[in-house]
Image (cartoon, rainbow, N blue to C red):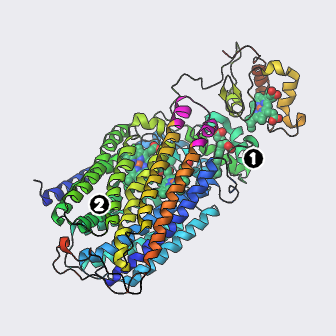
Amino acid sequence: MKFKSQRVAYWFFATCMLLLTLQIVYGIIMGFARIGMDGLHPVIPFNVARAVHTNLLVMWLLAGFMGAAYYIVPDECDRELEWPKLAYVQLIALVVTGVTAIIGFHFNWWEGRKFLEIPRPLDFLVVVDVLLFITNIGITIWKSKRITTTVSVLFFGLLMAALLYLPGMIPFDNQTVDSFFRWWVVHLWVEGVWELIMGGILAFLLIQITGVDREVVEKWLYVIVGFTFLSGILGTGHHYYYIGTPRYWLWIGGLFGALEPLAFLGMAIYGIAMYRRGGRNHPNQMALLWTLTTCILSFVGAGFLGAAHTLPQVNMYTHGTLVTGMHGHLAFWGAYACLVLAIITYAMPQVTGRKRNEDASASYAFWASNIGMLAMTVAFGIAGVAQVYLERRAGMEFLDVQRELEVHFIGLLLAAMVFGSGIAAFIYNFIRYGLPVAEPTGPADPTRRSSDEADGVVVPEPAAGG
Amino acid sequence: MLSKSAARLFFLVGTFATTVAFVALTVDTLRQVPEQTNEAQLSPAVIRGKELWESNNCMGCHTLFGEGAYYAPDLTQVYERRGPAFIRQMLTDPEGLYPGQRRMVTYAFTQEEQDDMIAFLEWCSHVDLNGFPPPPTVGVATAPAGAGAVAVPQVYQQICSACHAVGGVGGQVGPALDGVASRRDADYLRRWLEDPLAINPKSRMPKMPLTPEQLEEVLAYLSTLKAGEPAP
Ligand code: HEM
Ligand code: HEM
Ligand SMILES: [Fe+2]
């Protein structure tokens, strides 16, 4: 850690841990409801559990991106954050808004549009909050003497993510138009601007950890985000096949949707190539592992499993089945959850001044959560393919099919236990790091050559111990 | 080799071009959607129904146009599949219709609110979705076959088949009705359909909202379901 204000990142990361835990609790409630154990139904019916599960996911990922930005921007721009106090205010406001929304869901207060359930009055608070965040990092970048490609890609991604939240707030009377613009948020986030955020954070991590020259990393960053937008913007069409929009989307969505995996493939090759190129043996191997896992699993979950149902002929049968659920889990996990866990793993030794990244709990967390999530994906996948065949192709009744699928949800729950134990270990490790230190632990870098910065070097354990 | 500025140019030009194309297509789509979705029929009732749909987050269990959650049936075609009487029953007492099954929330809608919701679901069922949901492709019949001269009445397909199977097709909440005409005489069937609870107060089959004509149609159909004569 070069600057004192980078410490605020810690509190964003701590928020992530808390919200992730709650997210898993609600996931497990849904898993049990699906095997007939729905004792909580009168208090937490499935639609409440689901809205809480997915909104917590989005909220902790956003908190993670903000934390990452507060850590990365001072580092890249070589100056303190403009208003560190505002960052705390903004975090508290975010948590209060989020918690209000989650409690509201339990009392039937919501907008009832998938992923955008947050009621409209709270939407405005979210927008104000995000604007404060954008202003804070924006001014910090503006006033700095160097603006790197990494930081501009990250900033542009965050700014666009804020702007793209707006189309989701406009009310429409026509269900088709409503759904059309819902995808401007949902799709253009995860398959557009969030990939910019991902590219920015990954570039920072790769430069720091592998020591590859900044010029090389950033050149390929442009190529990858170029592919992202080239395919991803018109790729929105893969959601416009069967919602009442014109037929030409079958061609456009089919073609550009099929190109989308290239950006993720690029990300995977990029990560591995930079790792092999970099000569530096960074002491935080755990962070390296999470970074490479992000590159690879985002390709598997988003690229490969996305490609599996993006063609209109296939999507006709898989649209709105558990196949989508399978893809949703591994895509969000591989691309964005792993990314946030990677930057947390990288930043923690620096902000707390303690080295806990080699603890057994850290490597257990890595293996159990990833193996657990892959097993969950398999369970969802088998259930999804069976559902497509029985319900869509053979025409069986919905509920009869669901009864046949229950056994796979027992499998899902077993896998979720492994996954959950991994996350528990991650959080245990996080707590063991202790609170952030008051003063910077590494010297500010006067040479600007990232590859020989001192920040990666092992930080001595404070005498007091953690 | 590719230089950094060439890479940046590729990013900027690509993004700009596809954004322009996307905005143009959006404008065209918004022009065509009113016709494709019968916007002229978006009555105030339909719009109120949509608001109820959203303020109760039905999408948190169901899909509509294939979007939503995977816990409960897709409702795009439910108006055709089940008809208004069944939907009204679902919105009054869902557990009466599907006893002991996966549970839906019991809503306290007024009669008017139920009408609005039904109007919304009816409007949805007429939107041209480019062929979604697809008809089944594997060699299983989608509707119970009619025996001889008597065709399967629409009300049977909409309501009864949710709970009963004939020839292996249909729900499993109640017993399969193959051979029911041999098990039960016509008088019993009539009394049963008029009010199941009068015969068996503990029955899990609710009293069905049938008009007298529908009752005759269904009885005529049931009388063809004899043992040893598989539905053709
Ligand atoms: C990190 C990137 C991605 C994430 C987080 C993600 C996540 C999701 C989620 C959550 C859904 C369900 C959305 C809803 O119904 O509201 C979805 C749907 C879909 N995704 Fe992705 N996705 C990603 C990338 C991709 C890619 C690269 C492709 C194509 C190659 C793809 C293809 C699809 C398709 C076709 C659907 C619609 C499924 C349906 O019709 O039910 N996704 N995705
Ligand atoms: C303990 C582990 C978990 C369990 C048991 C679980 C279970 C579920 C269930 C049952 C659903 C609803 C599917 C339906 O509509 O029927 C769901 C939705 C979803 N979950 Fe999880 N989940 C878990 C963890 C996670 C994690 C860690 C993530 C993110 C990385 C995640 C992301 C999602 C997403 C994006 C959806 C919406 C999918 C869609 O609409 O297609 N879940 N989850
Ligand atoms: Fe998409």
Query: Can you say whether A54 is above or below B78 in the image?
Result: below
Which amino acid, mark 2? Answer: Gly
**For this view, does A151 lie left or right of residue A19?**
left
Task: Provide the secondary structure element on which disc 2 rests.
Answer: helix
The numbered mark 2 sits on a residue in which chain? A
Q: Indicate which disc residue A384 carries.
A: none
Magenta span has A356?
Answer: no
Query: Can you say whether B86 is above or below A209 in the image?
Result: above
Task: Provide the secondary structure element on which disc 1 rests.
Answer: loop
- Is residue A177 visible in this depiction of the protein? no
Q: Indicate which disc residue B93 carries.
A: 1
* C-alpha distance separating marks 2 and 1: 51 Å
- Which residue lies under the disc numbered 2? A199
**For this view, does A241 lie left or right of residue B220?**
left
Q: x%, y% of residue B158?
A: 67, 32
- Magenta span covers which residues? A386-407
Q: Where, by quadrant of the figure, is residue A201 drawn?
A: bottom left
Q: x%, y% of residue A351?
A: 36, 78
The numbered mark 1 sits on a residue in which chain? B
